[in-house]
Image (cartoon, helix red, strand yellow):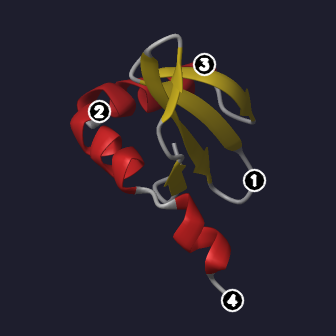
Amino acid sequence: MKDAFNMSVSPVFSKDGKNYAFVTFDDGVRNAEGKIPECTILSSKGFSEKEITQLEDYMRRELTNLKKMASSVNVWSALMKD
């Protein structure tokens, strides 16, 4: 798998009392979107099954940090940037 990815984490969403966030991976050619805390890839373009498994493993290993990142996303400040 290619070493350099752009990764972004959405803010926390809530549905039916359960919190979740989305994690996207992009290397300029391929992209994938996963969901935490389930740590599953929901959609992908260009990744092999093995690479998808590696991305899901990464989300499981880094779940605590990904949750912190999602909880710190401030949508309003991002929208107000020039």
Q: Where is residue 65 in the image (x, y as percent from the top left)?
A: 25, 44
Answer with mark 4 or mark 2, whichever residue precedes in sequence: 2
Q: Which quadrant of the structure image shows residue 66?
A: top left
Q: Which of 50 and 59 is in front in this view?
A: 59
Residue at the disc numbered 4: 82
Q: Which residue is drawn at 71% across and 25% down?
A: 43
Query: How far separated are the C-alphas under marks 4 and 2?
Result: 31 Å
Q: Which of 51 and 78 is in front in this view?
A: 78
Residue identified by numbered label 2: 63
Measure the C-alpha gap from mark 1 to mark 4: 27 Å
Location of residue 70 with respect to 22 vertically, above or below: below
Q: Position of residue 57 (x, y in %)?
A: 36, 25
Q: Quick check: marks 1 and 4 in contact, CB under 8 Å?
A: no
User: In the visual, does 64 lie left or right of 35?
Assistant: left
**Disc nearest the viewer among 1 and 2:** 2
For mark 2, give the secondary structure: helix
Looking at the image, residue 39 lies above or below residue 72: above
Name the residue beneath numbered marker 3: 49
Asked if disc 3 and disc 1 are in contact, CB closer than 8 Å, the reply is no
Q: Does residue 31 appear anywhere in the picture?
A: yes
Kind of residue sitting beneath label 1: Val
Q: How crowded is mark 2: few (under 14 residues within 10 Å), some or many (20 or more)?
A: some
In contact (CB < 8 Å): disc 3 and disc 2: no
* Identity of the residue drawn at 29% across and 32% down: 63
Disc 1 designates what residue?
29
Amino acid type of disc 2? Leu
Q: Distance between the residues labelled 3 and 1?
A: 16 Å
Task: Check contact, mark 3 vs mark 4: CB within 8 A.
Answer: no
Provide residue 64's location: percent of width, then percent of height: 23, 36
Work out whether mark 3 precedes mark 2 in sequence or the reverse, and give the earlier one. Answer: 3
Among the 4 quarters of the image, the one containing residue 52: top right
